[in-house]
Image (cartoon, rainbow, N blue to C red):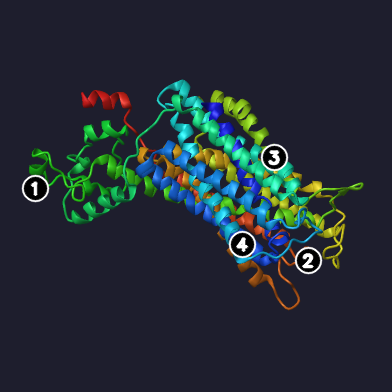
Amino acid sequence: LFNNGTVNQGLATLAFFGVGVNLVLFLTRVLGQDNAEAANNVSKWTGTVYIFSLLGAFLSDSYWGRFKTCAIFQAIFVIGLASLSITSYVFLVRPKGCGDEHTPCNSHSSLHIALFYLSVYLVALGNGGYQPNIATFGADQFDEEDPKEGHSKIAFFSYFYLALNLGSLFSNTILGYFEDEGMWVIGFWASTASAAMALLLFLCGIPRYRHFTPKGNPLSRVSQVVIAATRKWKVQMMPNSEGLFDDDDKELASNGARRILHTNGFRFLDKAAVITSSECDKLDDGARNPWRLCTVTQVEEVKCILRLLPIWLCTILYSVVFTQMASLFVEQGAAMRTNISTFHIPPASMSSFDILSVAAFIFIYRRVIDPVFARLTKSSLTELQRMGIGLVIAICAMVSAGTVEIFRLKHANKDCLHCDDSSSLSIFWQIPQYVLIGASEVFMYVGQLEFFNSQAPDGLKSFGSALCMTSISFGNYVSSLLVTIVMKISATDNMPGWIPGNLNKGHLDRFYFLLAALTAADLAVYILCAKWYKYIKFESREADATTAV
């Protein structure tokens, strides 16, 4: 089951990035869009993927369950990729061999364009709805109350993220090469085959999977707590929160959820579980109105969400740093010396060092750092501590990128816009910043996956995984907004701004240092939020069983 989940993720990621990594080139070379229109369309498509992740999480937690949701959205993913492959072969890549850097394609009808967008948005729907659930479904296969399985569950998230990066590496190199050379149909069919293999592998494990029933609509459960607490705003509570309505053992037993122990924070929400005299009579008759009286576990679910939000907000700025790897790092690399003898190094291919760094640091963390730390302190690093370390490394990455830019400008030809060797500084000086970003991912994103999965209530596990994806989505939007603001402020009559078309006339280094400063401020806020955070406490299933008896 461990290998099944990680291989499935690697194959699905390979398929997704087989489309996403060069989608902007497909739009410009095959569909004839200009750079601005293509970039805008790719941003909309990427944002839609993350929006669909919330849809997938909602359906999984509320109605379908994680297995059914994963299977349905993976099937949609395969259908979308197959449709894209067929549409490209029959209608779009005409004449055959067009779409490379030199051969333009014929114009297309509105119907052909509509079929293309239908296909790529089916891909977005399938991948977006599947992603937050497969990580949670994989974690479901381990019982965290069992010491051996609990350790395997922690390892699962590390290797799950590694599989994601290895799939991305194959897409960026092999499939990216085919598509860059105009062999779009081959690249798309390879993605389709990879997604189909991932789906078949997922279905092969059906006899061995552990399944958990959905816990009902979380929106209604949250609304019930808020409304019940509001209705009892003036009700006096007993000291130490005594007399609160405890959970319905039959309800817990029916859906497999664990009871959440009461905490003292957000005490105004506890009023939703206060039993009034009128409700006491109804309870004796076996009747309870959930919009007037909620269980302690239900109240604690809402408290848990409120506690998670500040931590989640602090991860968005890290995602702003992470997104620079696919944008400004590439533009910076394109303005450096990219040749070794006669061999040209594509600036985007430098992201391979990030992926290799992820693989290396996952091994280093699991085999060296974690055992040494556990030996010295008698405990492992918590998820919150690891996420904080990720922020520190991200600051170092931005300082490294800014320092490289200072030296790049010293070796730059100020009048060179798109010529070769616009700076004599080698692109390999970017390796440290890519390696540092990769190291930060191991601590931040793997820690984030573990944290939101372990701290989300049983009925909101997929929602917890979706928070990771929405963090990246908001990071993209904040990055775009930040660049716009910086350019508006820094551009003057004599200065084209920090990030102009010709980087040799700008100050990209200042933007990197600004990100480092903002991330440092975010780290300070994060430390306060992490100290304030209270970990969720579940009652063990054995204790639940004893209580039910």
**CA separation in Å, label 1 and label 3:** 64 Å
Q: Relative to 43, is 242 on the left or the right? A: left
Residue 527 in sight: no
Discs 2, 3 touching: Cβ within 8 Å: no
Residue 194 in sight: yes
Foreground: 85 or 168? 85
Label of residue 170 in the image: 3
Q: Relative to 429, is 223 on the left or the right? A: left
Mark 4 or mark 1, which is nearer to you? 4
Q: Relative to 189, is 105 on the left or the right? A: right
* Residue 464 picture quarter: top left
Tell me what residue is drawn at x 59 percent, y 54 percent: 320
Q: In the image, residue 315 lies at what x, y percent? A: 52, 49
Residue type (three-letter) at the residue carrying disc 1 = Ser
Q: Which residue is mark 4?
A: 113
- Residue at the extreme top: 148
